[in-house]
Amino acid sequence: MKIQTKTVRNIVKSPSVLILICCSLHSQHSLAQSISVGTVTPEAAPDLPEQHSLANTPKAENAILGLWINGVDLQQETFILNMNKQRYIECSILQQGFVNTAQLSMLKQDNIQYCLIENAGFSSEIDTQKQLFKLNIPAQYMLKQKLSSQQRYLPDLPNLGGFINYNVYFQDGDYSKQANASTDLNLFWKNALFNSSHMFRKNYNDQQTNFQKSSRLNTSLSFEFPEQMTTLKLGDNVSNYTGLNQSFYFGGLSFGTNFSRRPNFTYWNTPSVQGSALTQSTVDLLINGSQAYNAKVNPGQYNIDSNIGFSGLGDAQIIVKDILGNTTVQNISVFVDQRLLRPGLTDYNISAGKLRYNYAYDDNDYRDWFGSGYIRRGITESTTLGATADYSKKLESAGLMWSQYLYKLGLLEVNSAYSHADEAGLEGYTVNTEFKRNTQNYSVGLRAQYYSSGFRMLGLEEYSDNSYLPQWENQIYVSKNQIPYLNNLSLSYIERKYRDESNSKDQQLFNLRTSRTLTQNLFGSLGISYDAKSNDRASVDFMLSYNFDDRKHSITLNQHDDDETSVQFNKYSYENTGFDYSIGTSRWHDVYSGNASATMKTNVGDLNMQYLQTDDQKYYSANYMGSLVWLGKRLDLSKYISDSFALVRVENSPNVDIYSNGSFIGKTNKNGEIFSYNLYGYTENSVVFDDSQISIENSFTHSSRSIMPINQRGYIIDFPMGKIASHNITFKFIDQNQQPLESGSMVNIEGIAQGKYPINSQNLVTVYGLNPQSYSIKVQTSNQTCSSQFTLEPDIAKDEIVVLTCQ
């Protein structure tokens, strides 16, 4: 018998471990209730019956066995204690096995907590061959699991740096002549961003220069707080759009949440998969027949936030399959909409400052002080409530918002606001209601909004006039997919009715459209529109587009009624660099024209040029967009920075290909550096270099990096390189009879350019400059050739002689 002994803990200072284990394995008699704990290897198992039910086991017997819970091997042994004819297991080990010990009765002995395992629904057995105690516990006694497929939403903080975006535009011809330029300065560090943007204009009228001074568009300082998902912005700003008011410019401060602008943060009511599993199981969520989520769960109750990319009504199936192959299917109806916040989630914003007017032309047109607040909160998965309030010297307003899912029908929204314009002595209100039903095959929507004559909005220059607002505004749309022959069909109706004192005209617009792929490369669409108020005939337009096999070249024909026709040939690629162009001709009534445009895309900016020639007039323009970037002591020209970017540094490795999010960026310069400018904020981005282009003398730990940036920030991504330490290795080759190979035999190591190495008179051979890797070796003796394999480990002893068998 082979016995290994280790002391886990002392329960009582009594019989020796060796005596205890021998007795427990060879006798069915009762043992002392308190013992020292030992470990027995499987080889020591006695010849007992293979499985022994606890129900038939003497209540006084203690045991030390490996523990299984609901079919899961915990890979740990436990002491099974009997006390007062009841069985206990150490609570600490049960907790490692997904069990919620707070629901179990406990016994404390010698400072050790034991949990009672004879509750209702518990069952167990002993596998004596494997020395295992198999315990089955109902799911309600398991720790609850809350799983989620959400990406991490804490972004990386940027390095110190900045960039200046610039856009230069020039236009000339028989229409007009002008030159414009804009600059956008950004400085960032950690969670702070300073921004200042300007516009410069120069117009030419009747051969005389009419110059207008530059205008400051924006100056602001903002701070991101990723853990709280909030943003504080000081300076020029734009108010949040709430659906009850229009956005307006102001100078001051704004503080609120920003998660609704993050593409991968789940803030709407995605389905939660709930259930319980007695064993390890796989859970699949299918929506409209397509897999939306897959996860593995441990025994017990589980709740999974699916974070699916689905919107609208759908039929879902939850399929649970356990390790024994048992499968259960549950059918449910789901509804997902971005207007419904997750229960308990709050979206809010608080703003204060001065209203700004003439934003693009006047630097300092700040007028009335104001304060504004906005909040929406998910009450349940089906209900989201919100409120908004604005205050200034001239206007006060308040509104309520309600988003409600109607079971198996769709989303209903009801919003209402009240306003009071002090100086104008006006009071008014608006009511908005909307219903949407979106399924896999069709969508239906209805919207109606009423504005009373006295209703006003914050940010308007003249509160005495509201002629820009209609009295009624109604909209209806219906769309259907998978229609035979037509593929899809959509119908929309928009009605706007203005008051008699308004200068605006009433509208009743009908629009019917359909589109489909006619062949593999040919796509077509047809549209019919009609304005019932103009009493004019319906307008018809259709389009045909043909994509050539390379998917970069296409030709498009547009026909609108019988008085407008255009044909355009296009070349466009999605690469970051290259040359795109378009050339075409058009007819409008009896006027014919030709047009051409070209775009040169480079890593230091994009140049776009356009030319238009009609019968007697011409027009041409050009604009160049780029950026000057500063990051990590590096100043360089780059593309216009719309998203985030990175300085990629592959240490001392020039001309190495760099890929960002699967797109080729370019080759590193002589210093091993290149800018990558297509990183997307609040999203996992991958940056990779081609490791096959790295010198064999260099070593690196990884060739790819994942990063989640904040919008319009810069990051340094380093790929450090280390020199591989070469080794001089002395080999001794022996044959299958353990005899050394004869002197003079030639050793050839594949991949070593120095050639062959002879075995010396001491039956040894030394090879110089080997790197840590695997080698294939061939040895030519006087009468045969044999082969061997060798892997050089970095920590090999300096003077070690390596003995290899050559076969």
Image (cartoon, rainbow, N blue to C red):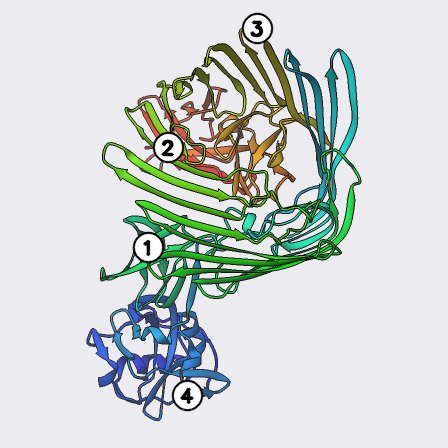
Q: Type of residue at label 4?
A: Ser
Picture quarter containing residue 710?
A: top right
**Image position of 397 with respect to 202: above or below:** below
Where residue 799 appears, x then y in whole percent? 55, 39
- Rendered position, 20 above or below 372: below
Left or right of residue 77: residue 596: right
For marks 2 and 4 on the same chain, the one whose residue lies earlier in the sequence: 4
Task: Say what secondary structure mark 2 lies in.
Answer: strand
The N terminus: image quadrant = bottom left
Q: Residue at x 75, y 11 (%)?
A: 207
Residue depth check, mark 4 versus mark 3: number of the one nearer the observer = 3
Q: Nearer the viewer, mark 4 or mark 1?
A: 1
Residue at 61%, 47% (x, y): give it.
246
How many angstroms separate mark 4 from mark 3 (CA)?
108 Å
Q: Which amino acid lies under the numbered mark 2 shown in the image of this protein?
A: Ser
Q: Given the image, on which type of amino acid does mark 3 rest?
A: Asp
Find numbered disc 3 in the image and state the secondary structure of the residue it sits on: loop
The residue wearing badge 1 is 285
Quote the CA–CA distance across marks 2 and 3. 84 Å
User: Residue shown at 46%/57% (left/top)?
Assistant: 413
- Confirm or deny contact between disc 3 and disc 1 (CB under 8 A): no
Residue pointed to by mark 4: 34
Is residue 740 visible to the viewer in this orientation of the structure? no
Residue on which the image places disc 2: 788
Cβ–Cβ under 8 Å for marks 1 and 2: no
At label 1, which amino acid type do we have? Leu
Rendered view: 734 above or below 291: above
The CA distance from mark 1 to mark 2 is 52 Å
